[in-house]
Image: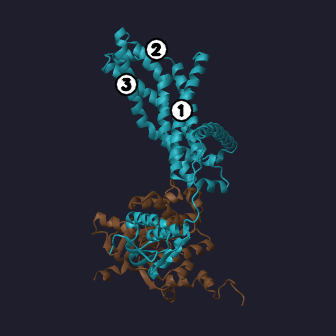
Amino acid sequence: MANAGERAAIRVRDLVVGFDDHVVLDGLSLDVERGEILGLVGGSGSGKSVLLRTIIGLLPKRQGSIEVLGVDRDRASEAERRAIERRWGVLFQQGALFSSLTALQNVQFPMREYLDLSDRLLQEIALAKLEMVGLDASDGAKLPAELSGGMTKRVALARALALDPEIVFLDEPTSGLDPIAAGDFDELIKTLQQTLGLTVFMVTHDLDSLSTVCDRVAALADGKVIAVGPVSTLAQSLHPWMRAYFAGRRARTRAGEPSHLPTRTS
Amino acid sequence: MSLQPQLSTAVNEGRLELTASGSWTADHARALEPLIDTVARQGEQARPATIDMRNVSEFDTYGAWLLERLTREWSARGKELRVQALPERYRGLFEELHHANREAPRRPGGESRLLLALEAVGRAVTELGRDLLVFVNMLGALGQAVTNVLLRPQTFRITSAVHHLDRVGWQAVPIILLITFLIGGIISQQGFFHFRKFGADEYVVDMVGILVLREIGVLIVAIMVAGRSGSSYTAELGSMKMREEIDALRTMGFDPVEVLILPRVLALVCALPLLTFLGSMAALYGGGLVAWLYGDMSPEIFVTRLREAISVTHFKVGIIKAPFMALAIGVVACSEGLRVKGSAESLGLQTTTSVVKSIFLVIVLDGLFAIFFASIGM
C-alpha cells in the first residue's frame, strides 16, 4: 500500500508559482519515478529552475502539492522535513561551494552536520567521494576560488552526494563546461546513478546530455509540462517550441542529418 | 527497514567466517566502524577469512568503504578476505571503492615552532611593504586618471560623481550631525564638571571651541566616514572584482580607476570638508546647549566668549585636514576593494582591513598635521 505512494520519487500536482503578478508555473503536474534520470527542458525563462527551486523548497508556491519520497512538505513536521532534506542532494548551477572551506571540507560539511562519524572515517569517505567524481586528494586541499569550472562542478556533485542521497537535483550540470568536459560529466552522472541507484532530476539545455543520459525528458512551456517521454518520442511532438528545439539546426547537426552546415561527407 | 548493522564471527577449519547483516549505511556508520575495527584487530592471527554479505539489507558508500577497509586490512597482512554473496545491485558500488583512497594524503610537515613564528614575522614585514606599495600605486593611478580627465574633461563621469556625493555626503548628514552634537555636548559637560572646581567655568568655552574646530570635529567625521563610506566602497569594488565586472571594464578599454575610483574618491574629497563644517557647527551647538542647561551659562555669554576664544585660524586648521583625510580613506578603501579575491571570506577580510587601515591613517595624518601646524605657528 505504501509502495503505491512511494513509487514516484517526486510527485508534483497542479503547481502554481509566481512572482508578483507574473505567473511562472501554472497548474504544472509531473512525476519522477524512482531510479530514473529525468531531464527537464524548456526555453530560457520558462521556469525550469523555478520548478526545481520550488520542489526543494527554496521558493514558495501558491497552489498545488509537492511530494518528495512520499512526504508532502506542507503537512510534514520540522523533523520530517529535515529527514527529507537529508535524503536529497542539490547541485547548483554555479556550484555554490562554500568559499571559505576547502573542497574536501565542502564535501565533509553535510557529513559533519548530519552524521556522527569518527574523524578518520570522515576523512576517508570524503576523499572517496572526491575520487568517485574524478578528483584526487591534492584537489581536496584547494579552495573553491582555485578550482576550474569543471572541477567546481565535480566538487559540488561530490558534496551533493555526500550523504548518499536517494534523489539528486542537478541545475544545468553541464553549463559552462566545454563539450568534452560536459560529455565526461554526463558519463559521470550516469555511472554514479547506476552505482548508487539514484533518482536524478536534471534541468538542462544540453541536447547531448538529454540523449545520452536521460531516461525520460519533460518539456516545459507556458507554465506547464507539455510533454514527457523518451527523447525519441518527444522529438516527434508537434508543439511549436518542441519542433523548434528538436528540429533546430543544432539538433539536426548533432543527429548527422542534412542541415545548412556541411557536417560530414559520405 | 533500517536495522542495526551486525557482524558475527565464527572459526571453521582455520578460516574466519564473518557474517554481516543489517543496514550498512551512513546513518549506522558510527555503530559499524567499531565492529569493523574490532574484527580487523581479531584478524591478527592472520588467517584467511570470508565475509557473507547475504543478509545486508541496505548498503551505501559508507558501508562499501568500511567493507573495503576491512579487506585492505587483510591484504596488508598478505591474507585474503573473500566477500561472498554481496547482492548484485551493490556490487558496482563496492567495485568503485576499490580505487578510493589509494594515495595516502600528504601530512603537513612538522616544522619547528620558532621557524614558523619567524616566518610569520617575515611575512608580516613584506606584507607591510606591499601595503605601502599598493597605496602609492593607487595614488599614482588616481593622479594619472586626474590628468587624463583634465586633458579630456568630457571623459569625467559627472553623474557617477554626483551619485556618490549624494551617498557619502548628503545621506551622511543626519548621523554626522547627531554624533558630533552629542560629542560637543559631552566635552562641554565634562569641562564644566571639572573646571568648576577651579572656578574656571568660562574657559570651558575656549576648550570646546578650539578642540572641536581644530581636532575633534574633523577626526570624528573622518572616522565616521571611514566606517560608513570607506567600507561600502571596499565591499562594492570587491564584489565587482569577484564577479569579474572590473575585468570586463578593462577589456572594453576603460580604465577602472577612471570609471569607478576617481568619482568615488572625488566625491569623498568634496564631502568630507562639508561634513566637517556641519559636524563642527553641530558640536559647538551641542556644547553651547549643555553650557546653558548644565553650566548655567546663557547663550549670549557663550557666543561672546566663543568669539574671543577662537579665530578663523582654528577653523582653517581643522578644515584643511579634511580633504587629505578623505583622500587617504578613499585610496585605502578602493585599493583594498581591488585586492579582494574570489571568496566571500576575502571580501569580509578586505572590508575590515580597509576600515582599520583608513582609521589608522586618519589618526597618523592628524598627528603629522599637528606637528606641521605647530611648526608654522598656526
The residue tagged 3 is B185
Label of residue B360 in the image = 1
Q: State the separation of the CA atoms marked 2 and 1.
A: 31 Å
Circles 3 and 2 in contact, beta carbons < 8 Å: no
Query: Which mark is in front, 3 or 2?
Result: 3
Circles 1 and 3 in contact, beta carbons < 8 Å: no
Check the rendered structure and report the hue given to chain A: brown
Tell me the chain of label 2.
B
* Mark 2 residue element: helix
Tell me the chain of label 1.
B
* Mark 1 residue element: helix
Q: Foreground: B304 or A82?
A: A82
The residue tagged 2 is B309
Circle nearer the N terminus (1, 3)? 3
Q: Is residue B245 above or below residue A69?
A: above
The residue type indicated by label 1 comes to Phe
The residue type indicated by label 2 comes to Ala
Q: State the separation of the CA atoms marked 3 and 2.
A: 18 Å
* Quarter that holds the N terminus of chain B: bottom left
The residue type indicated by label 3 comes to Gly
Q: Is residue B66 above or below residue A98?
A: below
Mark 3 residue crowding within 10 angstroms, few (<14) / some (14–19) / many (20+): many
